[in-house]
Amino acid sequence: MNEMISEIINSYNEYLEKIPQGCESIINSAKSETPLDALQLITQFTEGVDWLVQVNEKLSTLSYENPLYVNKIHDFLEGINKGLEIQDFLRVADIFEYEIKPYFESIPPYEIPIN
């Protein structure tokens, strides 16, 4: 069981580490003339963050804690949706640049359990 948990934690930590670079890609696409690229990246981001939330919740039930605040993530996603509804890609880029990216940079990785 510990080996499986360690693998899951490794995957979680690896994905968490990639989020800031993903945010940069979204920021650049949203600020450029390629909003469709930004939409695709935002979809991928949303799916990935959904996976992080699910893993975080499952690990929490096993007494592994990490400060990933679901309500804060939902607030981010709500802001993104509002920006996308009015096709304000600069607003979306700002949310990723000034809110989402710093938030995910501040989340520490899980400690990997020692067998």
Image: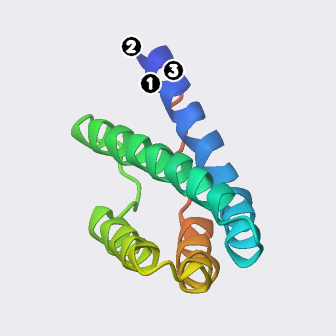
Give the x, y percent position of residue 107.
53, 64
Number of residues whose C-alpha sits closer than 10 Å to that of mark 3, classed few (under 14), some (14–19) or many (20 or more):
few
- Seen in the picture, residue 82 relative to 56 is either above or below; the reply is below
Task: For the N terminus, give its image quadrant.
Answer: top left
Badge 1 vs badge 3, beta-carbon distance below 8 Å: no
Tag 3 or tag 1, which sits nearer the N-term? 1
Quadrant position of residue 89: bottom right
Quadrant position of residue 42: bottom right
Tag 2 or tag 3, which sits nearer the N-term? 2
Number of residues whose C-alpha sits closer than 10 Å to that of mark 1, classed few (under 14), some (14–19) or many (20 or more):
some
Q: What kind of element bears circle 2?
A: loop
- Seen in the picture, residue 85 relative to 68 is either above or below; the reply is below
Give the x, y percent position of residue 68.
39, 60
Q: CA distance from mark 1 to mark 3?
A: 11 Å
Which residue is tagged 1?
5
Q: Is residue 28 left or right of residue 100?
A: right
Name the kind of residue labelled 1 in the image.
Ile
Which residue is tagged 3?
115
Name the kind of residue labelled 2 in the image.
Met
Which residue is tagged 2?
1
